Amino acid sequence: MNRITVGLLATAAVTALTVGTVPAAMAAPTAGEVNATASDPFYRYDGSKPLSSYKPGDVLKKRTLDYHIVGIPTPVKAIQLLYRSTDAQGRPSANVTTVVRGHRSDGSKAVSYQSFYDSLDPEDGPSRAIAGDVSLGGIIANVETVVLAPLLLHGYDVVIPDTEGQSADFAAGPEYGTNTLDSIRASTRTEETGLNSATRFGLFGYSGGAIATNWAAALAPEYAPEVNRQLVGFTEGGLLVDPAHNLKYVDGAPVWNGVIPMALIGVTRSYGIDIKPYLSEKGLKVYNELEYGSIVDALGRYPGMTWKDMTKPEYKDPNSIPAFVEAVNKINLGQAATPTVPGLIGQGNAGVLEGTLNNPAGIGTGDGVMVAGDVRALARQYCATGNKSIKYEQYNLLSHVGSMLYWAPRAMAWLNDRFAGRTAPTSCGRIPAGNSLEPEIPTVAK
């Protein structure tokens, strides 16, 4: 994404978000304003009681501020909440979410929008961008306003969690899910949001946002049953299902292989694994370059780089690192529970358009970064385990970026129908076969 494109999208985002509001003067931010949230104490829990004494979803702090786009304040107000959640290791954590009231909202319906900000830097989270912070890694959260604006104009309140948590644990799906569910809880426990236990919610997310969306839907029945009862459905596109397959699919690709070190860092960080002893000299260099980098830093930066390039020779097989295999199996959606609410799952399958030519045996092709066979397998698994309200769409002529543009309006229409009480469509019985989603088996390092 070049700077001209980013600028045009940001301009469109400002225009879209402020439609239907009273115009206000907008001045470019000063240098001090740009980094206003860099050391923002709002993000720190500093209460006298132990964090563990609070229930998941309890609100710890709240504030109301102007919704910013690329550092420019708009007339739209946003309510930000610091709330108690649970990290990947089951420990109490504090996280931030943002609530934006819809145009003519009555508090009866809301969309939990999971951003695809995909970063290893906590400063790139959507709440930071909304509060006025400007960073290259945070540009995605700004551009996503183009998606948020139609939801607001349709009367939905929108809840936008920082899905990766405050340590930015990229790709750590279960943590994405608990952060999302507890964000919904927090939004309904705050009077200023206008939301409550009777508000109906839809889950909406693409790519990194799809990770959070699907994990939230899968975890909700057990982790947050009261939230599950409020859900009308989940819609997602470009989904990460089995990370072990994705690593092989993008291995050596010219653009998307940058997610290999990002996932390696994010997943091991979330589960407290020291991966550095397994890395080669080049791997350590890449690790240090991307430790707090974003998807904007990683894409296309290491063309042709493979897993073998990053690790010592004896660890050329990813399964030869037992701790990593254990973590990868924990974030395999194929091993998680089946959602109980309707779902729309969209997936591209023209990865060659984004330079990913790989077609590994048992894995196949995808949209350039996500594996279509894995997503088909997951949708079929949901149908087979009792959820007959799963609609699966495969876009064979679209890649990851292109699929998002096609999927988003269809996802909004699908959600509108769920809120209207219409029967959810199903693809069960008509979804082509996919891949095995069985757990990876550790091997011996050679």
Image: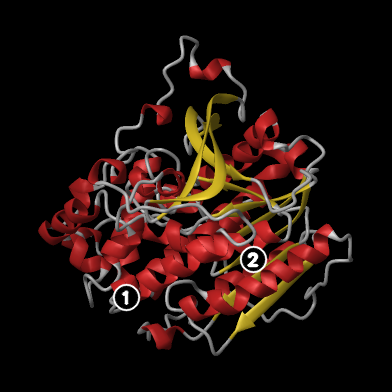
- Name, please, the residue furthest toward the bottom: 397
Helix, strand or loop for disc 2? helix
Is the N terminus in the top left, top right, bottom left or bottom right quadrant? bottom left
Q: Please, what is the three-letter code of the amino acid marked with disc 1? A: Ile
Residue 388 in sight here: no
Residue 275 lies, with reference to residue 308, above or below; the image says above
Q: Which residue is mark 1?
A: 4
* Image location of residue 220, percent across then percent down: 69, 43
The alpha-carbon separation of the residues under discs 1 and 2 comes to 38 Å
Q: Position of residue 360 (x, y in %)?
A: 42, 80
175 sits left or right of 307 in the view: right
Q: Earlier in the sequence, mark 1 or mark 2?
A: 1
Is 284 displayed left or right of 352 in the figure?
Answer: left
Residue 250 higher or lower than 26, as above or below:
below
Q: As rendered, which of 210 and 115 lies closer to the eye?
A: 115
- Crowd rating for badge 1 (residues with CA inside 10 Å; few <14, some 14–19, many 20+): few
Q: Amino acid at mark 2?
A: Leu
Determine contact: label 1, label 2, CB under 8 Å. Answer: no
Where is residue 370 shown, x and y percent of the image? 48, 71
